[in-house]
Amino acid sequence: MKATINSSWQTALIQLDTVSKMMMLPDDIHQMLRNFDRILTVSLPVRMDDGFMRVFNGFRVQHNASRGPYKGGVRYHPELTLDDLMALAMEMTWKCSLAGVPFGGAKGGIICNPKTFSKDELERLTRRYTYAIMPIIGVEKDIPAPDVNTNEQIMAWMMDTYSINNGYCTPGIVTGKPLNIGGSLGRTDATGLGITFTIANAVKNTKMNLKGLKVAIQGYGNVGSAVGKFLSEMGCKIIAVSSSKGGVYNPKGLRHDILIKHYKENGSFEHFPHGESITNASLFELPCDVLVPAAMGNQITKENADKIKAKMIVEGANGPTTIEADHILTKRKIPVVPDILANAGGVIVSYFEWVQDVQCYFWCEHEVNTKLKDILDRTYREVYTLAQEKKSNMRAAAMNIAVKRVADAIQVRGLYP
């Protein structure tokens, strides 16, 4: 497979190649990890509300199932590329491995702009996509989940479509579902809560304190706003937030509840009365203790990495930092807590949901959150300890642990036939 220059897929390959060399990974295992178990491309004809039929392209990418069934989200986006999905599927393999979750990595999606669809059109598209990928998904094969521009309603339609064709109700086929059809308590805020737990762990190893910690969050959507909410409750000071249309800054702090109310009423942070208007670009240059990029990938680049004034970066989004930016930040001694550690809360609680569905036995929210914290606390300690031992950055240590576990699984299982 030829990678597009400067693509997210090329970044994922470079990260794997770098850690494989550090680990002296056998070449045959390295080549297996560089490739994919399966990539499915599907054509999706859908009848639109105006009576005309449109054809959309969809994908399901399955990277590696050595440690368990494939797991990964489904995103709907007009600029979605196969490169993106390949990178994200590989990253999911490392994320599950690092957290000790017995899944492999996958990712799926449809090239479309769901914001232009009616609810009926969205349902027809979702059901068609589910039917098209049914041969390669299953409770013990591949379990999809929500991602960019998909939600629990999309998951409900996917679960229903699969169940009808399967002949019986199969709630474990997807995670991120509504509670009344097998969803898990704590799933909605899991990624944001996990990032919060990770920030708390990271701060313990510095001279900073959670109380009064100044935090800037790029991407105050479902994940970013949950981080803002939980950190505010811990006594942190949210000094800047942004959305795709820009953001707001107040060095004295911003109240989460007022921010959310304004955003819901106006669709942006424009004209927010309690702070200064800023751009997404300028948010990265603000003086703060912790910067949380929680929007899309490739936001911290070689063009802005040397302008960052944060004392620490905790990656809320997938792949927000380019390879070149990573090198710059390492030279500047700005620690970066990598995405496969920081934002693993979503897939961890998705795993909890799958376990509950398979057992037909459900947990209270306190149990879910306690188990989530235990896993993230343990994982952070493992990564931090290895980084200290090898005198490497956190990303290299996290990748080392994750790749080794998958490589070990491949070796102990052997090759068939």
Image: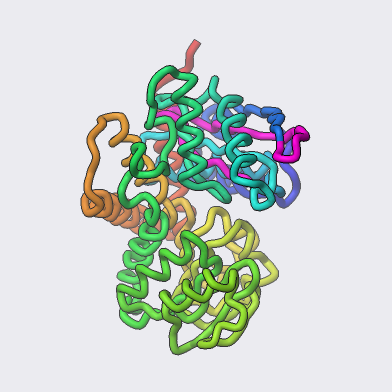
Q: Position of residue 101 (x, y in %)?
A: 36, 39
Quarter occupied by residue 231: bottom left
Q: Position of residue 12 (x, y in %)?
A: 60, 46
- For the point 36% across and 75% down, the residue is 232
Type of colouring: rainbow
- For the point 29% across and 51% down, the residue is 372
Q: Nearer the viewer, residue 415 or 7?
A: 7
- For the point 46% across and 38% down, the residue is 156
Does the magenta run of residues contain 144?
A: no
Q: Position of residue 106 (x, y in %)?
A: 52, 36
Please determine whether, in this image, residue 221 is positioned above or below residue 358: below
Position of residue 91 in the picture relative to residue 298 (left or right): left
Quarter occupied by residue 138: top left
Give the magenta range. 48-77
- Magenta-highlighted stretch: main secondary structure? strand
Q: Nearer the viewer, residue 386 or 299?
A: 299
Question: Would you say residue 330 is visible in this rendering?
Answer: no
Position of residue 61 in the picture relative to residue 384 (left or right): right
Residue extending furthest front? 50
Count of all numbered marks drawn on residues in the image: 0
